[in-house]
Each structure stands twice: as structure tokens, then as C-alpha cells.
Image: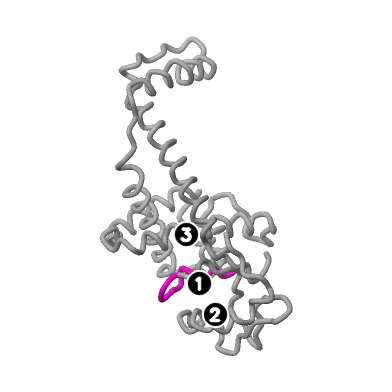
Amino acid sequence: MMLIPLRSMNKYCRSVLPSAIRLLPGLLLLTAHCSPLTGAVSAQQVVDKMVATVNAGIVPECRQICLITYSDLLWQLALQPNTPLDNPTSVDLNHALRLLIDQRLILQEAEKLPSIAPTSEEVKTARDELVKAFPSPGEFQQRLQRVGLTAEKLNEILDQRLRIEKYLDFRFRNFVVITQKEIADYYKDTYVPHLKTRAPGQIVPTLEAARPEIERILTEAKIESDTDAFLDNARERAEIVILNTV
């Protein structure tokens, strides 16, 4: 991960941030400027606070996905069930920031594949599934309203999440191979012992009966491992700039 040193921040602000501001009307006023001492963004009037940029100086024609604002962090928290929204802690905000940085790194790669763009029906389905994760549709709507997350912006976030999911499927799922030995070893070493511990006396399914579930578990584990390796590499090459601490 490459961070912009403070001594280079003035040049970075002049060359990169003004274009980001022009591309994001409504987030920051054009009077915003960078502090030569702290590297933070200051302004006479600020509508939203810029928190970080992800490859803003690397990705050609960088758009909104290069910039992370404080509102982005609040929206991330609002879409996480059982996460408090009143006076969010620095721990919660930084956790949200790390998630968003990883999402943006994947999304910047996903943008190169226009064929994986989600349909409006897929976005609607994703929204319906998300609502089910909360106690009620009413509480879900209240959380959105408290952080100023509009229906249009929610659809945009869900569209991005679906692009990420489709990209990971395209890049990793299609190439996952689970061998019969891996399934048999998992059944013997993990599946059966775990089931006997969790539910003593329960009849243990045969290997053949458990095979589809085990194959799914091993597939998801490999995708997660491949994704982690991909993100580790992406972070090493990335230009991630923290503009304001949270």
C-alpha cells in the first residue's frame, strides 16, 4: 500500500482532489483546499468530509469510486444490522473504512468488465434480501433516514456490491476445483467430529449425503482465500491516502 507523504500532499491536492471535487458535486464545495501542514482537507464550507482516496492518482478518469467520505462510512454502518448509529466509535468507523477500501479496490477492477453490470431486477432482489436482515422494514427505513441514505444512493451501493460479487465469481469461482480427496478428508477430519460435538446422538449423514454441503463449504473457503490473496496484492500496489482520521 502506497501512502502519500505529507510533503507531497500539496501537489497531490492540486493535481487530483480538484478533479474529484468537480466529479462529486454536492459532497464538497469548490472552495475546498488542502492544508499544507496536515494533509487534511479544509474548506470555508464543507458539506461532507473527505476521509480517504483509493488510487485517485492512478486510475484513469477516476470517478466517485476513488473517494471515500464520512457519509460513506455512515452508510456502511447503517447497512450493517445491530450496528449502533448514535455517536459511532472510532473502532466502528475504521472498520467501515477498511471494508470500503477493500470494496473500492475490487470495484475498480470490476469496472473493467461492463458485461457484469447488474440488472435493475437484480438490484431490487438484493435490496429485498438486505431488508430481511433487519427486524422490520420500518426499522430499516429509519436507519436509512438517520444517515441521509436515499433510495437512489442505496440502489447505487447495491449495484456496486453486486458488481463486486459478480467479479469475484468471474475471477475465482469458475476456477475452483474441489477434489474427491479434499471432500473425504473434510468429512472425516472436520464434518463428522463437529456434528458429533454439536449434536451427540444424532445420526451422522453418509459421505455421499454430505458431499454437496461439504463441496459448497470448501468452495466458499477457497474463494475467500483467493480473495484475501488478491486484496493483499491490491493493497500492496495501491495508492491509499488517508485525508482525515476517524
175 over 89 or under it: above or below: above
The answer to which image quadrant residue 224 occupies is top left
| Residue on which the image places disc 2 | 17
Q: Are marks 2 and 1 in contact (CB under 8 Å)?
A: yes
How far apart in space, not on screen, are marks 1 and 3 (Cα)?
11 Å
Three-letter amino acid code at the position of disc 1: Ala
Disc with the residue nearer the chain's start (2 vs 1): 2
Say how many tags the image has.
Answer: 3
Q: Quadrant of the N terminus?
A: bottom right
In the image, 120 versus 193, the foreground residue is 193
Q: Residue at x 42, y 67 (%)?
A: 151
Q: Rounded to the nearest whole Å, what is the CA distance between mark 2 and mark 1?
A: 8 Å
Residue with the mark numbered 3: 105
Q: Is residue 143 above or below residue 43?
A: above
The colour scheme is one colour
Q: CA distance from mark 2 to mark 3?
A: 18 Å
What's drawn in magenta, residue-wise? 59-69
State the residue position of label 1: 56
Residue drawn at point x = 56 percent, y = 82 percent: 28
Against 95, is 20 above or below?
Answer: below
**Which percent across, then down, holds residue 157?**
43, 63
Quadrant location, the C terminus: bottom right
Mark 1 closeness class: few <14, some 14–19, many ≥20 residues within 10 Å: many
- Pick the front one: 183 or 36: 36
Q: Residues within 10 Å of mark 3 (few under 14, many from 20)?
A: many
Q: In the rendered structure, which disc, 1 or 3, sits on the residue that comes first in sequence?
A: 1
Left or right relative to 187: residue 142: right
x and y percentages locating residue 204 in the rendered image: 41, 13
